Image (cartoon, helix red, strand yellow):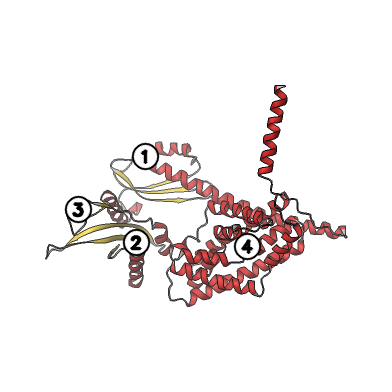
């Protein structure tokens, strides 16, 4: 009796969960869904002009660093159509739809890059802002966003009642900004910006396509049937080849991004926990991931660590899953190890700024000290100026020798591996003033 009640209870739970998560509820007619996606896959007439206008808007938003404008452009963008068309075509074995989706996606991509390149070539604003730089280095989170965004998009596209999910997916997966960033890379001659942005765009496109395929098969859309069985087998073979070509690189790229993120996280933790010495400091650290294990390069100042201590630290690398990584340590001030003195100066300044992160109110010296923290702009500066070694920023109080007046200014120390031009220095100073929202910037370049 008890067993029978338990069985009924478990059956009730299963039925309740099945009803709650049933995607067949409120599902639109399959033919209507297919017609809608096919229509959105086309790029001619209004769709083409809408794409061009959206590209201009997104390019302007990236150029002036306006998040609101970029979001508006993503809402306008019709780029989701052909990507979902490819996924649907694969799911229902419609080779003609797959070819149409790929062709239109390629046309849309080329037009988008050409349009954004034209804009960035003629615009008087040539500095790369943070919104643009964010689209040059894909991370593992971009993979997850594209995949789950694609799932949400195709689920919404198969409903009778249309909601605001599709616009939300367009914003989350961000297909438009990477294409504009690729155009900026071509117009400015930054090939790494171009490649990084295309890499991000490819990740988004592939995983949205995969998501569409999975939901279409989960909902059991009818596959297209052919009277000619030989032709049907041929189409099925082509579809399989497309799936393999699409999925294999995406799995490889996603795996590489995940492994790189894990390696950098483990390396950061290793350096933070194992290099805590009273009289020795890590001035610079660089993590280089590779399939063979990667490399951790550290520059130290202060008392030299004996080889026995370094070997003891190396043995602990396996505790951080870094047993295959190479640990390179440079220390001492002799010429053989080629330590740049400017790196040491920058590290000392940075350490001083960390210990004294207060701003004095010059109008009232007895007023309480105000805490202030600057945004982390290291990645942005490195992208703008690849020769940058270090930077440090702090608000300091300047006392004039000839009067009793004092003033608060923002002092920024920047060290470069080679000298920068006066024009670049002026641009950097103006950029820092805007980015740090400072009234007065004093830039010291080493």
Label 3 packing within 10 angstroms: few (<14), some (14-19), many (20+)? few
Which residue lies under the disc numbered 3? 367
* Residues at marks 2 and 4, CA–CA distance in whole angstroms: 36 Å
Do the CB atoms of the residues marked 4 and 3 lie less than 8 Å apart? Answer: no
Label 2 packing within 10 angstroms: few (<14), some (14-19), many (20+)? some
Image check: 284 left or right of 101?
left
Q: Earlier in the sequence, mark 4 or mark 3?
A: 4
Element under disc 4: helix
Quarter of image, res 419 = bottom left
Question: Which of the two marks, 1 or 3, is nearer to us in this view?
Answer: 3
Label 1 packing within 10 angstroms: few (<14), some (14-19), many (20+)? few
Q: Earlier in the sequence, mark 4 or mark 1?
A: 4
Q: Earlier in the sequence, mark 2 or mark 4?
A: 4
Which residue lies under the disc numbered 1? 307
Question: Which of the two marks, 2 or 4, is nearer to us in this view?
Answer: 4
424 up-or-down from 233: above or below = below
Q: Which mark is residue 80?
A: 4
Image check: 404 left or right of 211?
left
Which residue lies under the disc numbered 2? 436
Q: Earlier in the sequence, mark 1 or mark 3?
A: 1
Do the CB atoms of the residues marked 4 and 1 lie less than 8 Å apart? Answer: no
* Residues at marks 1 and 2, CA–CA distance in whole angstroms: 42 Å
């Amino acid at each position: 009796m008890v067993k029978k009640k338990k069985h009924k209870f478990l059956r009730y739970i299963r039925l309740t969960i099945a009803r709650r998560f049933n995607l067949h509820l409120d599902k639109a007619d399959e033919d209507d869904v297919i017609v809608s996606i096919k229509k959105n896959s086309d790029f001619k007439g209004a769709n083409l002009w809408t794409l061009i206008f959206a590209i201009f808007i997104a390019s302007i938003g990236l150029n002036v660093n306006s998040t609101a404008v970029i979001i508006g452009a993503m809402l306008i963008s019709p780029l989701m159509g052909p990507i979902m068309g490819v996924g649907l075509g694969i799911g229902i074995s419609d080779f003609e739809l797959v070819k149409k989706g790929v062709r239109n996606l390629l046309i849309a991509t080329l037009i988008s890059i050409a349009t954004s390149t034209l804009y960035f070539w003629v615009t008087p604003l040539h500095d790369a802002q943070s919104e643009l730089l964010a689209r040059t280095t894909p991370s593992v989170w971009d993979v997850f966003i594209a995949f789950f965004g694609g799932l949400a998009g195709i689920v919404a596209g198969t409903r009778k009642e249309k909601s605001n999910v599709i616009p939300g997916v367009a914003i989350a997966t961000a297909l438009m900004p990477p294409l504009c960033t690729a155009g900026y890379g071509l117009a400015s001659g930054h090939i790494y910006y171009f490649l990084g942005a295309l890499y991000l765009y490819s990740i988004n496109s592939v995983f949205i396509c995969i998501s569409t395929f999975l939901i279409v098969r989960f909902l059991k859309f009818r596959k297209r049937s052919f009277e000619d069985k030989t032709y049907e087998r041929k189409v099925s073979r082509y579809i399989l080849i497309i799936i393999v070509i699409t999925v294999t690189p995406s799995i490889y790229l996603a795996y590489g991004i995940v492994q790189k993120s894990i390696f950098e996280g483990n390396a950061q933790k290793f350096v933070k926990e194992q290099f805590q010495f009273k009289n020795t400091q890590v001035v610079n650290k660089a993590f280089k991931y590779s399939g063979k294990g990667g490399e951790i390069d550290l520059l130290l100042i202060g008392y030299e660590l004996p080889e026995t201590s370094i070997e003891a630290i190396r043995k602990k690398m396996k505790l951080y899953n870094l047993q295959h990584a190479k640990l390179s340590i440079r220390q001492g001030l002799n010429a053989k190890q080629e330590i740049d003195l400017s790196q040491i100066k920058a590290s000392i300044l940075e350490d001083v700024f960390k210990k004294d992160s207060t701003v004095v109110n010059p109008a009232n010296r007895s007023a309480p000290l105000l805490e202030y923290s600057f945004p982390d702009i290291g990645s942005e500066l490195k992208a703008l100026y690849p020769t940058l070694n270090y930077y440090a920023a702090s608000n300091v109080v300047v006392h004039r020798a000839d009067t009793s007046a004092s003033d608060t200014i923002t002092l920024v120390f920047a060290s470069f591996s080679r000298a920068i031009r006066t024009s670049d220095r002026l641009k950097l100073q103006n950029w820092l003033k805007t980015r740090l929202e400072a009234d007065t910037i004093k830039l010291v370049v080493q």
